[in-house]
Amino acid sequence: MTIRVSSSRGEAINRTAAQSDTDERLSAHETENEQTTRNLSSIVNRFRPDLSHFEQVYKDLHQYPELSGQEARTASIAESHLRRLNFTTHGNIGGGVVGVLENGPGLTILLRADMDALPIAEKTGLTYASHHHMKGADGIERPVMHACGHDTHITSLMAAASLLISARKEWKGTLVCLFQPNEEHGGGAQAMVDDGLYDKIPRPDVLLAQHVCPLRSGVVAIRSGPILSAASTLKVRIWGQGGHGSEPQNCIDPIVIAGYILVRLQSVVSRVMDPKEIAVVTCGSIHGGDAGNVIPDFVDMMINIRTYSQDSHSKALEAVEGIVKAECEASKVSRKPSIEVTDRFPLTSNDAGLVEALTKTFKGHFEDNFWEMSRSTASEDFSVLATAVAAPYAFWTFGGTEPTRWDDAYKKNKLSDLPSNHSSLFAPIIEPTLKTGIDACALAALTFLAI
């Protein structure tokens, strides 16, 4: 089966000579038949490391999570592990860590795991729950939790690196293991690229990444094309004219203006966007004033926009900005609102050829636990690492919910009740979640490394 590299829109891509060479090598790299898939499974089963060690690594990472851009301890753990495995390591590239293992001629495959946690107080009740606190960029100390499961990603990649180096006589090529900071704010991948990532490591031919989610533990899921939305977060400040709450006639109340903006935002998806397009507009934060009898000078709002195409994104962004400005003008504010884009995530769209190859590998290994991935309006910055070198990429998910619990929720049509990513209750069961993440990571790399 030839691995075909396609664009996210299914259109032909104009490529450089170097990329054309990559295409030729990818096309020449064939999965012969079902025997090849069985061979990949055999390699993983024979060289899988002692999971008890990595279960302890996972618990440690879970207990001591670190906020975006402050992942020093986590990065040190990952880098030390890669050094022990005799990878050539590169520390502090934009806050991230990279290990390179050259193992003869073949493709260069990059595996990525994100490292950052969230400012959330954990409520899982686990014996290894986080009680860690850190100061954020704003200087305020908050509880921190791996509520998005990045500790699972780190541990899986560390263990997969151990597996692949033990199995190095079974494959050829170059393996790159990359541990990325600051995924939650969409800045980590770009920071690594901007800090000269591809001046320090071999340019990858294929990039691969995964994410734990509330699927049934043991399940792996993937699909081609768009899978995760493009997203932007706007920080908006509405200026008014403060004063005594008993004299609103002498004030311009920014809380009222914010209220009108909030209501009008609900019309962006229903009245501005094409109903055939996926779009989400959410106001996740409003803050104004500190006393009940004082009209404040300003109100701050955080507005998030998610779409599945750049055209839709631009349209939604324009509509949101227009509503904010129009409501402020209607209220005769003396100072225009400030609108700042604080986070920006690109669209994640899996390469069809890579997904075709991975589907065959994953089906052969996971059997009934291989599912088709559902599209999500969550967002990722992983694709930045790929587009920086015009290389194809693939991103998949794997489950973390205890199987009988998931089955029960499914039977009762209550899957939405299960704790999900970014919940204070999100707690992936350790096994078979880790084993699944490790196997998927190693199998994905072996699919494209010369056997």
Image: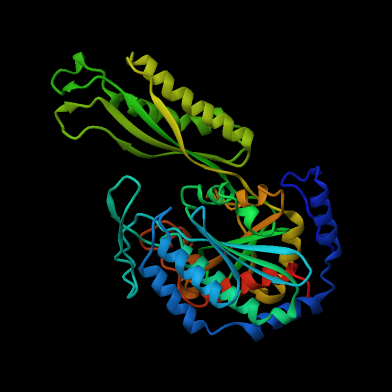
User: From what the image shows, is residue 397 above or below residue 434?
Assistant: above
Residue 142, image x, y percentages? 29, 54
Query: Which residue is painted at 63% across and 39% down in the image?
Result: 309
User: From what the image shows, is residue 270 above or below residue 440?
Assistant: above
Query: Which residue is painted at 60% across and 76% down in the image?
Result: 86
User: From what the image shows, is residue 50 above or below residue 147?
Assistant: below
Residue 230, image x, y percentages? 57, 43
**Display coloring:** rainbow
Image-based side of 220 in relation to 417, left or right: right
Residue 113's image quarter?
bottom right
Image-based side of 254 in relation to 219, left or right: left
Residue 396's image quarter?
bottom right
Residue 242, image x, y percentages? 21, 22
Residue toward you, 57 or 17: 17
Query: Which residue is painted at 59% across and 44% down in the image?
Result: 346
**Residue 407 shows in the view:** no
Image-based side of 2 in relation to 416, left or right: right
Residue toward you, 163 or 245: 163
Query: Which residue is painted at 77% across and 50% down in the image?
Result: 6
Quadrant including the N terminus: bottom right
Image-based side of 386 in relation to 327, left or right: right
User: From what the image shows, is residue 136 above or below residue 300?
Assistant: below
**Residue 175 shows in the view:** yes
Residue 168, image x, y percentages? 70, 79
Quadrant including the C terminus: bottom right
Residue 374's image quarter?
bottom right
